[in-house]
Image: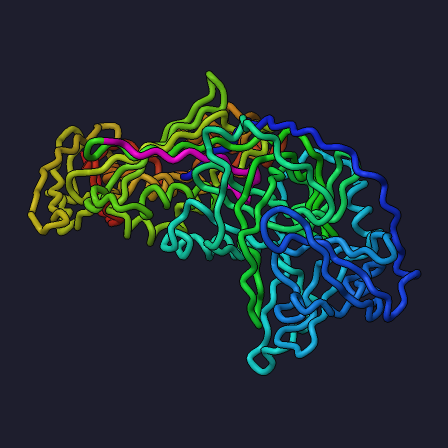
Amino acid sequence: MRHGLFLVFFAFLIVPIFAAPPAISTLSIDELRPGQRGQVWTVFRGTEPEPFEVEVTGVVRNALGPGKSLILCQLTDPRVQNMGAVAGMSGSPLYIDGKLAGALSYQIQRFETVRYAGFTPAADLAEVRDKPDLTPVKIRVTPVATFNPTSSDRSFASTYTPLQPAFTLSGLSPQVVDLIAPHFAALGLNATALGGSTLAAASAASTSTPPAPLRAGSAIAVALATGDITIAGTGTVSSVDGQRITAFGHAMLALGDVELPLCTAEIVTILPSNLTSVKIANTGAIVGTITQDRLSAVSGTLGPGPAMTAVQVEIAPTSLTARTLRFQVARHTQLTPALIAAGLTQAIVGSNDGALAHGFSITSNISFSPTQTLTTRSLHAGPQAFAQGLNQFVRSLAQDLQNPYEKIFPSSIHFTVEALTTNPAVTVDLFQLSRATVRAGETITATLAWRDFQGEAHREIITLPIDPAWTGKTLEIILGPGPALDELTGRPAVIAAATLRSFDSYLSAMRDDRPRDGLCLAIAEKSTLFSDETTSTPEIPGSIERIARAADEARFQKRDAVLPLFERHVLSGKLTSVIIRRPLRVVD
């Protein structure tokens, strides 16, 4: 059974002084005419917005759904005509006759001879801006549609394709980016390692020079992680209304109500491409909180940043000094596991330290409050084995985040990675019982033989007592990893919300896991278990079961499982996945 973990409250309180810009009047799509000239403001390099010219082609009505139209413009400026709409220009405001008409947001074609782009109308931007900010809910991510042409036509998109924000991953080596990319892609996050960050983990809450005021056309970044590991999507400000900011012109990840850091950004350059041009950016200081991630835009408020999960990954000293990574990640059930895994993988895989090659342990210390803590430990047979098992690690973190009982997140998460002197992987060659039938009160022996990673042979003789109370029973001797025995004994891999009644009982269930290293040796009998939350009682009278289940069928469960009568932990500090079951009969 794998459960629990994660998330915190650690806000960066950077409150720059932003002068309220003058109100900008808007132009409705009904006022647009083909041939009208407009200017689009964006940052080509540095932080200063510049205009480029476009010409209105027309309005595509209901292009994105009922009432959601697109303004189609030809990119007439030579600088943009050569490279097309650029990832990172998302949200660049379009002005016609001094009025805000929309924001650059959609790519129309690939490899076209004349460059066009789609613009989200100003009214749709305002709709997102004016939505009330609510507490984010735990929802499943619906990834933004990505371009995926068929093999028969790779020059033409069958749907309007949002200009993806230029997601950058700084602090991660290319090897780590390749490993974590599939997990990000599953969330709709197409990331590139091209980019950087000027926001240091230790100094995120204090900056000597306030950032320049944001205005329409400024480059911004919406961060998912900040610090030694920074993951952020770069786009462009569409409008600033007092302390309210609207950007991107389309969804970032379509998360709905969110709490994500809003950061300044510096554009290093634009990489032109016939396929997808992209801005290379440095993510800067946190200057606010994005609270809406909707179809037509992202929107938020300038001022303090949001609460985030503070993560520290410490590599215990293997030579003269230790290595420590410190970063913060956004609080979101689906995003957070992959973000944390990226930082942990970087600490383990993305360095020149070869001391972890023999294997290592990871100890996780999670503190929800002074009285609500959780500690787990796992073994790994070297960086390659960890990388190969990354899918399972991310799934485990995702299960750990399923806390439907309280709006509570860990106040701190501390990983300690310690090198092992020998590889913990072993191969079990033999598991043999001295007898399959035994008299009550006697003992039997189990012979366990194994080879370590280098092939050296080992053997252990284990004495198993036979309780007279087991007389007449047909039992099983089970040898297997702790999580496998957890499952055989009827403990679910994921706790259903209805089976528990409080966060404290949830934490208690998480602490009740069997060891994840070595093997558990158990003498067990088949039974029918009746569970109240996570406490199980074997073979209760039918009348009691009926009364309890009638009162709360979700809380009280009945299932077939094995009931351990005797348990022992063997091969402590070793790793093996073998599961062996042997029959045992106890007679007078």
Find residue 522 and report its horizontal and vertical position in percent: 25, 37
Residue drawn at x 21%, y 28% is: 468
Vertical placement of residue 11 versus 48, above or below: above
The residue lying at 78 percent from left, 43 percent from top is: 129
Q: Is residue 330 magenta?
A: yes
Q: How many marks?
A: 0
Q: Nearer the viewer, residue 247 or 338?
A: 247
Q: Name which quarter of the figure residue 57 lies in.
A: bottom right
528 lies left or right of 119: left
Task: Give the percent coordinates (x, y) of residue 307.
Answer: 58, 30
**Residue reaching furthest top?**
370
- Compared with 99, 343 (above or below) is above
Give the residues in magenta.
321-336
Quadrant assignment for the N terminus: top left
Is residue 49 shown left or right of residue 430? right
Residue 330 sits in which quadrant? top right
Q: How is the image coloured?
A: rainbow
| Relative vertical location of residue 381 with respect to residue 413 in this rendering, above or below | below
Q: Quadrant of residue 20?
A: top right
Whether residue 398 is visible? no
Q: Residue furthest right?
A: 31
Q: Residue 460 versus residue 386: which sits nearer the camera?
A: 386
Q: Is residue 350 visible?
A: yes
Image quarter hosting the C terminus: top left
Q: Position of residue 214 (x, y in %)?
A: 69, 40
Examine the structure image and report whether residue 158 is included in the region drawn in magenta: no
* Residue at 66% in and 39% down: 290
Residue under the point 15% across and 42% down: 422
> Is residue 568 left or right of 110 when viewed as pictured?
left
- Percent x, y for residue 449? 11, 46
